[in-house]
Amino acid sequence: MCSLTSFVFPCRSQRTAKHCLKSKKLPAPRRHLMSSQNKSLRKSDKSLGHQCQNPCTKPVGRNIRRQGFFLVLVLIVIAVATMAVYSFTDLMIAADETAYLTGDLVQARSTVDSGIEAVRLILAQPASMREDAGGVFNNPNMFQGVPITDGSLGNPTSNFTVLAPGLTEMGTLGGIRYGLQNESARLNINALTVLEENSDAINMLTGLSGGSVDAGGILGDATASEESDLSTENIAVTLLMTLPGMDVTIADAILDWLDEDTEPRENGCEDEYYTSLATPYAAANGPVQTVEELLLVRGVTPQLLFGADSNRNGVLDPDEQQRYAASIETPGVLGWASYLTVHGAEANKTMDGEFRVNINGEDLEVLYEELMTAIGDEVFASFIVAYRISGESSLAASVASGASAEALAAQGIEAQDADNANSESEGTVLPWSVEALDDFDLTGGAAVEFNQVLDLIDAKVSLERNGETFTYTSPLIGEPTLLAEFLPFLMDQLTTQDGDVLPGRINLNECPAELLMGVPLVDVDTMTAILEARSQDVGGTTSDRNHETWPLTEGLVTVDQMRALLPLVTARGDVFRAQVIGFDSGSGLAARGEAIIDASTPNPRVVHYRDLTHLGRGFDLSVLGGNIVVPNNN
């Protein structure tokens, strides 16, 4: 074994030093220094009692060995540094791409906001101006691939597209269109309790028209047990039963959730049920804020509420069809959310955006002046004022126009006796003339009010003069050809209510067939005829379809049937749903949002917004439109 000193300075080094002294002529000072070092080393070895047994045969310098070690070390350092630089560069590239993508996403979200503001601007225009521009039901020129950034230099542009579920020829949901969805095309669940309270009055009108309340389309498909449990006199329950997959127990539970009392219906439930759950809560007993709140109601499941439309785009995509083994013809495939809303209102205005004239105004002289300004027809204006003084009520008008024998029998009146009584009390029957108004005192106030504008049809006004009774007939006669000439204009200009905004009703032109067939006041054949007629002009883009009385003017329903339908249906509606997709034409990155806009006021406002970006774009870029830019990767 070598000594410690030999380990630090091997004998090979010692021999090398001696060899160098003998073989090379070094300067004297250096030879002396190395000789002294060698002597010190020998003394150190001798002091440890050790002699090297294996002297090195080949002298190798100490510095030559250490030069190889540093080379390896340098290579390792370079490799580590290279990897660090590569990782840093890759991280910076990813951060740069993330920054660009984040910017594109922010731009896409801003594009959605711009699209919503554009829709607000469009809805701020009067309905007549919107119709002149192509309407908002299906208008690709207005709503498809609208650019909001300049792409004149070939750069990608930011665009927005507004889409809504389409309607098939049979009136069922299917396909897409470029436009807005009228919230009145859905059933307003918050209005159900009001309809329930007024069911008796509406059913009375139905009885006078000879209709059958239980003739609603969806009830014809109900099971026998459901029919036995269902009270067809409750219009609210009947309308709920139009929803695919609905049963009486869920319908009653929904109405119990909405009504103010705490008394459960026969098939419903109240707080006693909800407080007994694992996570107890109380029933709302009032209006709901969103459709999703119905998930708290007993029996309502996500599958029933949302169906197979998992990305909420209003369309059954191929992957959804495969996942749920369903097609667009499957009942309820899009869920109840496609049929329900909590928003719905109508501005009490004309198509030109002017407020209508309330024909129930108290001051008859002022009313006459307003009528002359609005309709400009002295015959109609004078008759309306005279009707307010001594006109027949809506019920009397229905009897006079030929009520059903069953309705008269229920009142203990034979049809022949009613005709005789009417002829005796009418006296001399004359057509209305403007000069007849001179015999009426407009300062005495009104004695009769209109229930609806349709009360003018075949109405009569009685006048006592010199002991003789004179009966004047309305200038608005219930013949479809004559009604088609005057009724749309009168429906546009006149109203029987003072409010600026009216509660939303079911849109006759745009609602799904399921809702229309479920209206319990008209038979299935009549509703089928209405569906076939509207399929020729889906969306009501012609002027004749701008008012809910078009089935009457086209001879599809009678006057009394239209009177019964009027509280439930409309052809307008001023609350709209817009699903807006903002996208970049280059990267295809998109954001999606759904806004509900109330345009019943002069300044349309967003009453509800939901961000749908996390559910994906929802539609292919080819559907969204816009100038698609293919990126150049060279």
Image (cartoon, helix red, strand yellow):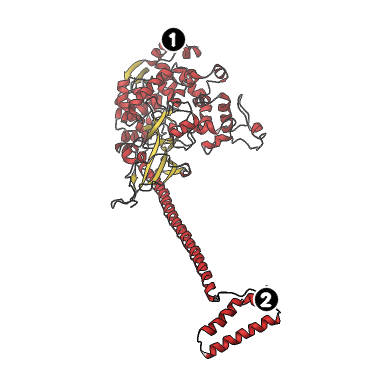
Quick one: SS at disc 1? helix
Q: Residue at x 54, y 75 (%)?
A: 60
Q: Nearer the viewer, residue 21 or 379?
A: 21
Residue 366: % across, % down: 37, 36
Kind of residue at badge 2: Ser
Q: Is residue 590 above or below residue 131?
A: below
Q: Nearer the viewer, residue 143 or 524?
A: 143
The quadrant holding residue 604 is top left
Q: Nearer the viewer, residue 588 or 633?
A: 633
Which of disc 2 and disc 1 is earlier in sequence? 2
Q: Residue at x 57, y 89 (%)?
A: 32
The N terminus: image quadrant:
bottom right
Q: Which residue is mark 1?
A: 417
Q: Nearer the viewer, residue 576 or 398?
A: 576
Exactly how many numbered labels are in the figure?
Answer: 2
Q: Which residue is mark 2?
A: 3
